[in-house]
Image (spheres, grey):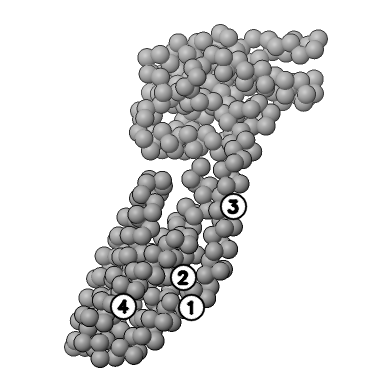
Amino acid sequence: MLIQNIYYQEERKYATDRFLMLVVLTLLSFVLSGQTSGDMAEKFVLTGFILLTLSLFSMAHFYFLSIYPSALVGIRKNLLIFIDIAVLTYLILVYGKFGLYLLPFYILIVMRSGLSFGVQFFYSSLLFVAASWVVLFFSSPYWKQHSDVLAVFAMTTFLIPLFYLKFIVQIHEENTELTQVLEDAPQENEYDELTGLANRQAYKEKVEELLHDKVPFSMIFIDLNKLKAINDMYGHHVGDEVLKEVSRRIIDNIDKDDFIARLGEDEFVVITQRKKVYMDKLIAKIERNVIGRHKVGNLFVPIELSMGISYYPEDNHNAMMLAKYADEAMQQAKTDENRYHYFYHELHQGKLSS
């Protein structure tokens, strides 16, 4: 999955570090503008506003990659590198001879792009920088006159990153290998070992996916009552058999498009996209066919459930709050001897049975 991709995590870290650096440089530019005068003060003010705009773009970039992690990956990375190099080149032109102090930032952008994004972006950043040197030479009388200084920094910008190219390639290979290992091991990461159901991590990802796509769904929290008593009385091997049987019965009574996960020792969750009008029928079916007894060896072990249901988007738009509401409704069902389930809106509207 993309959230397990090392380069995605690196891109998020890069975006965060970049934003913080831009904020610091923006503040520094405005501070320096107040401590200088004349043409230099105007340049610092211009720099401050340019960096402020770049900071806002950085926020938009971070939001985009968080909401659409798999969209336009190559384009957004190259665009980020291009914009940074283009802005840096413009500022070097603006500051003239003082732009000399900004030239080392080319090396920083090239090195960081290779380490955070991968080898292909290391090469693309070098191409962008090469184009920038050409622009500086032909667009600035000062840099055309001091082409020797420009040439020295150009060679330095290429030679230093190339010196570390072997290291960057090694990092890239290790990241690719680790990403492949993570993507090839879904059973370990996303499934419960005992029941074979999805686990808490997979449940969180499913909810985030539905919330991102704004798909209405119902969240059903299910608690297997008295599991501790079963374990204490008959042993954990009997409790494990009951858990597996409950898992099987729930699966048999929901649709193939419904999602089920085991959240903890005795807690399950079902995520269904069926319309609310059919929810009463589904809950009744689960109660009718799951609750009962299960034979383990010569024992007949009782199976009893408590369920709590919350709705998206009616009850809330936040994953944590939807889970909290479903859990509250489930806890209410556990305290009511006459019912096995509650909908959260019943609690919210004060419609509890007396």
Q: From the viewer's perspective, is 54 left or right of 280?
A: left
Q: Residue tagged by mark 2?
A: 111
Q: Determine whether the residue tagged by mark 1 lies in a helix, strand or loop.
A: helix
Question: What residue lies at 36% left-to-right and 35% top-to-bottom?
Answer: 213
Which comes before the other along the chain, label 2 or label 1?
2
Q: The residue under label 2 is which amino acid type? A: Met
What is the distance, in whole Å, between disc 3 and disc 4 at their CAs?
Answer: 36 Å
The answer to whether residue 323 is seen in the rendering is yes
Where residue 17 appears, as percent x and y from the top left, is 44, 65
Who's the residue at 59% across and 52% down the image?
177
Q: Could you say which is closer to the camera, residue 257 or residue 250?
A: 257
Q: Which mark is on residue 160? A: 1
Q: Earlier in the sequence, mark 4 or mark 2?
A: 2
Identity, as a three-letter code, of the amino acid under mark 1:
Ile
Q: Are marks 2 and 1 in contact (CB under 8 Å)?
A: yes
- As drawn, the label of residue 133 is 4
Q: Quadrant of residue 174?
A: bottom right
In the image, which is nearer the foreground, mark 2 or mark 1?
A: 1
Kind of residue indicated by mark 4: Trp
Disc 4 to disc 2, how far (Cα)? 17 Å
Residue behind mark 3: 177
